[in-house]
Amino acid sequence: MTSATLWWIAAGAAVAIELATGTFYLLMIAAGLASAAVAAHLGLNGTAQIALAAVVGSGATALWHWSRKRHPHSAPARENRDVNLDIGVSVQVTNWAADRTARVTYRGAGWTARLQPGCAAAPGLHEVIAVEGNWLVVAPQALPDTPPSPAASSSPP
């Protein structure tokens, strides 16, 4: 068996393990192993093949890690508006129970709402900030800034 064949088998094994585990970094290592296989096809010696596999694999892994650190992580699915369109919707809470839950009507059905920790339990308009199973996690909705009245903003002539 040639060294190129061994490199290709190792690259394939890395991809198979990645598919089983979901570790994207193994694809970067597989790219390094594949580059060593190409180097073997080009006739480079064993030391050059190993060096190329190490440089490409570790370089690709480092670039991927750096790229992920530069971009902010998205919110968890339970709090992410891109995943759950209920986030950010307003609901009316009429009264709170002693356990900081309330029954609210949302989308034509009754839901159990739970108050976000640290918020005061007061009736009124609340915003859905997360969905946990069939519970809405809500927080009091901030009142929009009201523009000053025309009388207050006009200056005397």
Image (tube, rainbow, N blue to C red):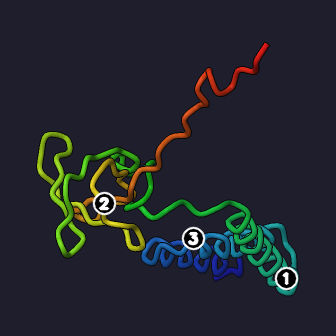
Name the residue carrying label 1.
51
Q: Is residue 106 left or right of residue 31?
A: left
Name the residue carrying label 2.
122
User: Which residue is rendered at x = 23% and y = 64% of the image?
Assistant: 133
Q: First in sequence, mark 3 or 2: give its number.
A: 3
Q: Residue furthest front?
A: 156
User: Which residue is rendered at x = 54% and y = 35% of the image?
Assistant: 146
Mark 2 vs mark 1, foreground winner is 2
Crowd band around label 1 with a 10 angstrom C-alpha radius: few (<14), some (14–19), many (20+): few
Residue 24 marker: 3
Q: Is residue 18 left or right of residue 90?
A: right
Q: Tell me whether the residue at label 3 lies in contact with that at label 2, contact meaning CB atoms closer than 8 angstroms.
A: no
Q: Secondary structure at mark 3?
A: loop
Residue 96's quadrant in the figure? Answer: bottom left
Q: First in sequence, mark 3 or 1: give its number.
A: 3
x, y (%) of residue 126? Answer: 34, 51
Q: Secondary structure at mark 2?
A: loop
Crowd band around label 3 with a 10 angstrom C-alpha radius: few (<14), some (14–19), many (20+): few
Q: Secondary structure at mark 1?
A: helix
How far is mark 2 from mark 1, CA to CA?
66 Å
x, y (%) of residue 67? Answer: 73, 63
Question: Which quadrant, please, contains the C terminus?
Answer: top right
Residue 26's quadrant in the figure? Answer: bottom right
Q: Is residue 108 visible?
A: yes
x, y (%) of residue 75? Answer: 50, 62
x, y (%) of residue 55? Answer: 83, 77
- The amino acid type found where label 1 is placed reads Ala
